[in-house]
Image (cartoon, rainbow, N blue to C red):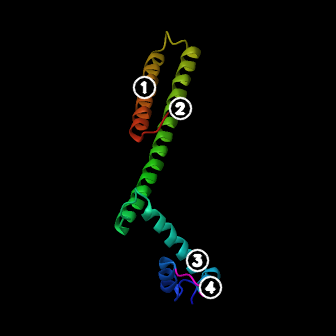
Amino acid sequence: MSGRTCAKEPEILAATRRGRIGPSIEDHVRSCPHCRSAVAADRALALLADSGDAGPFPSTTVLRLEAELRLEEQRLARRARRLVGLHAGALAVSLTLLAAVRLVELRLDARVSSFGSAGSICAIVAVAISMWNLFRTAEESALPL
């Protein structure tokens, strides 16, 4: 018997399925971790097969595709979180820009300076674009805000 398989496994499983478990088989199942797990898995699958809603077990191709789909969904969720974070940062920067322009307007007396109105308009446009991008990205990625 190697560490990965047991030569007696087919015999043990056949005996447990027929219900002919003798003392030697019980002793072997108790002492062999591989056969113990094989018998436990066989019993669990038998219980599953006996249930009324049991369908055919999916093929390995279906299981592999489901695993790949789950990995792709996780990758897309990570990407969406990064994009939402990036757009939230851009919104914070544009709000900071708007606040800075307003402070400069207050200090320089914006009535005489054309910088104040042009700066305010640009900052407001930057905030609006950032907000639009943030909401659009959050909606596309189906992340709650």
In percent of width and height, residue 21 lies at 56, 81
Give the mark toward the camera: 1 or 4: 4
Q: Which amino acid lies under the numbered mark 3 shown in the image of this protein?
A: Arg
- Is residue 22 part of the magenta span, yes or no? yes
Q: Residue at x 40, y 56 (%)?
A: 53
Question: Image quadrant of residue 109?
Answer: top right
For marks 1 and 4, the one nearer the N-term is 4
For marks 1 and 3, the one nearer the N-term is 3
The vertical placement of 27 against 143, above or below, is below
For marks 2 and 1, the one nearer the N-term is 2
How would you rate the neighbour count of disc 1 (Cα within 10 Å): few for under 14, some for 14-19, many for 20 or more?
some
Pick out the residue farthest to the top. 111
What is the span of residues highlighted in magenta in the rendered image? 20-24
For marks 2 and 1, give the CA distance: 12 Å
Disc number for residue 23 = 4
For marks 4 and 2, give the CA distance: 73 Å
Disc number for residue 92 = 2
In the foreground, 25 or 73: 25
Q: Which amino acid lies under the numbered mark 1 shown in the image of this protein?
A: Ala
Q: Which amino acid lies under the numbered mark 2 shown in the image of this protein?
A: Ala
For marks 4 and 2, the one nearer the N-term is 4
Q: Residue at x 47, y 20 (%)?
A: 120
Disc number for residue 36 = 3
Residue assigned mark 1? 128
For marks 2 and 3, the one nearer the N-term is 3
- Is residue 79 part of the magenta span, yes or no? no
